[in-house]
């Protein structure tokens, strides 16, 4: 009994089929409770007013935008090293979710920035690196879409993901050097004195948990769809060759 | 190794006019910018280092698809892959050939075009230095992109989408070094970072380029 058993698509489909409804329900419960709590049952910030409530969507989506890329990197490495097809397909399924999370973070950030900083957009390091991350996602997905042979596509996108990760980190520090920022520093760390007040922190944790589970649910759905798509095309190819 | 390099250089210079095309494109970009932002020499002089860097980067991008595509089509890449030379060396040589035929002319042309943009006195020296250090990285990164998209039918647009985000760190440090130089500030830090990126990409990326080329040749 090991994790690698689920590299077998049949076993993966069976397990993910069982787990998926529970993850989806839990994601919905956490999201609804976190967002409702955050939107309606927390006080306004004394300086930011009610715009502080954007935090319940902005922070979790930004968190998942980065973690989705990280998951793709791990899945790509597993594909290149152990050649498990499920892993490659999971990386493929995570990319659209990640790009939407990046977009949500950018858009809610603009809505937050307009009243707070007086501008929709600033060339702040964090904002800029998210824009670059967005471009990386677009390139990765375009490469998947451009190649017909599934194994070649998985190989090439995996290498792109690894090289892209290095350059994404490099860009992150390069833009730090390039411009000073408006964006505040980390204020959710577990080991720091100055953090967000507990009133905002508790519903935010629920919302983050909801986004994490939502991400898992969407990636599972995407991976299952990809596996079934692969199967149907195999069946069609077999029928045609008869 | 020398034979391959000389062959690539000959092909680039003689066949199909790809050699002068990058330079002409660089010239066009630089000429078009004043039409876009107005003939104000003070403003142009201020943004000149950035324009020259972006122009050089785009000119570099334009010639990328020629690096491996022609060899892939006529089958000589298969021969190179089966020869005794490791594929890592082949892609490095291709990047070197690309730099000599595209990067080096751009470096030499940049100060001349700087006149058109009213670059400041100190700027000429620093634009040459920063481009000289930075353009090898552009060639090496571009070779990776070219190797990645070599098997695709409409690889050109995809190539730009994949390569341009990878150019971001090089552009940031290169243009920053040139800008600081033109304004008479200290250029040490961005130049060192730029040199670091160039050294890092030259030493590591050929392995990735060779890996994707092997996948594409399968």
Image (cartoon, rainbow, N blue to C red):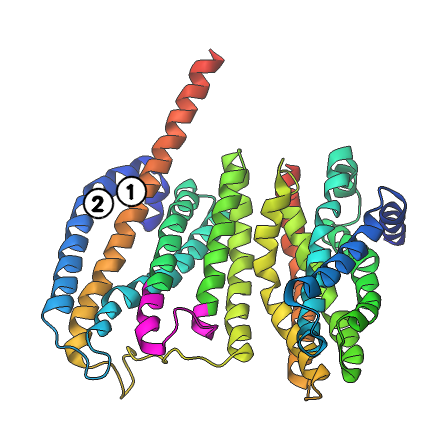
Residue at mark 1: A221
Asked if the residue under mark 1 is in contact with the one under mark 2, i.e. CB atoms within 8 Å, the reply is: yes
- Residue extending furthest toward the left: A41
Magenta segment's dominant SS is: helix
Vertically, is B119 above or below A31? below
Q: Is residue B44 left or right of residue A14?
A: right
Residue at mark 2: A20
Please state the horizontal and vertical placement of residue A60, each as a whole percent of the image: 28, 64
**Disc 2 secondary structure class:** helix
Chain letter behind tag 1: A
Q: Nearer the viewer, residue A54 or A2?
A: A54
Q: Do the dots labelled 2 and 1 sit on one chain?
A: yes
Chain letter behind tag 2: A
Bin the neighbour count of mark 2 within 10 Å (Cα to Cα): few under 14, some 14-19, many 20 and up.
some
Q: Which quarter of the picture shows residue B125?
A: bottom right
Please state the horizontal and vertical placement of residue B14, each as a whole percent of the image: 90, 45
Residue drawn at x 15%, y 67% as measured from the top left: A39
Q: Which residues are magenta?
A: A108-127
């Amino acid at each position: 009994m090991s994790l690698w058993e689920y590299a077998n698509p049949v076993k993966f489909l069976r397990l993910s089929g069982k787990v998926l409804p529970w993850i989806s329900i839990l994601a919905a419960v956490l999201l609804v409770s976190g967002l409702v709590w955050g939107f309606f049952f927390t006080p306004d910030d004394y300086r930011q007013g009610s715009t502080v409530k954007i935090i319940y969507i902005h922070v979790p989506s930004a968190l998942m935008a980065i973690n989705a890329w990280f998951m793709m990197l791990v899945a790509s490495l597993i594909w290149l090293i152990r050649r498990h097809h499920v892993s490659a397909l999971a990386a493929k399924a995570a990319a659209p979710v990640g790009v939407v999370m990046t977009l949500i973070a950018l858009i809610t950030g603009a809505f937050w920035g307009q009243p707070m900083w007086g501008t929709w957009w600033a060339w702040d390091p964090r904002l800029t690196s998210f824009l670059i991350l967005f471009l990386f996602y677009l390139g990765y997905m375009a490469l998947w879409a451009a190649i017909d042979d599934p194994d070649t596509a998985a190989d090439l996108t995996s290498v792109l993901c690894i090289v892209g990760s290095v350059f994404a980190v490099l860009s992150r520090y390069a833009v730090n050097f390039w411009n000073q920022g408006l964006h505040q520093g980390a204020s959710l760390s577990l080991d720091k004195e100055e953090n967000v007040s507990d009133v905002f922190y508790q519903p935010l944790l629920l919302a983050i948990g909801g986004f994490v589970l939502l991400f898992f649910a969407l990636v599972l759905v995407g991976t299952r769809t990809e596996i079934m798509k692969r199967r149907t095309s195999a069946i069609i190819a077999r029928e045609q060759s008869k | 190794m020398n034979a391959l390099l000389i062959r690539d250089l000959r092909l680039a210079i003689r066949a199909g006019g790809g050699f002068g095309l990058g330079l002409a494109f660089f010239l066009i970009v630089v000429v078009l910018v004043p039409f876009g932002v107005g003939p104000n020499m003070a403003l142009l002089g201020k943004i000149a280092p950035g324009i020259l860097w972006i122009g050089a980067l785009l000119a570099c991008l334009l010639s990328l698809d020629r690096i491996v595509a022609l060899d892939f089509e006529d089958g000589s890449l298969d021969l190179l892959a089966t020869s005794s030379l490791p594929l890592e060396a082949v892609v490095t040589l291709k990047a070197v050939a690309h730099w000599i035929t595209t990067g080096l002319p751009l470096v030499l042309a940049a100060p001349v075009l700087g006149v058109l943009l009213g670059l400041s006195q100190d700027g000429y020296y620093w634009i040459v230095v920063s481009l000289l250090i930075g353009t090898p990285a552009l060639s090496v990164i571009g070779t990776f992109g070219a190797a990645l998209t070599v098997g695709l039918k409409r690889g050109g647009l995809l190539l730009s989408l994949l390569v341009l985000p990878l150019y971001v760190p090089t552009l940031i440090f290169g243009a920053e070094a040139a800008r600081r130089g033109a304004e008479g500030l200290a250029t040490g830090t961005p130049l060192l970072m730029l040199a670091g990126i160039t050294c890092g990409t030259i030493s590591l990326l050929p392995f990735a380029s060779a890996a994707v080329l092997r996948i594409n040749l399968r």
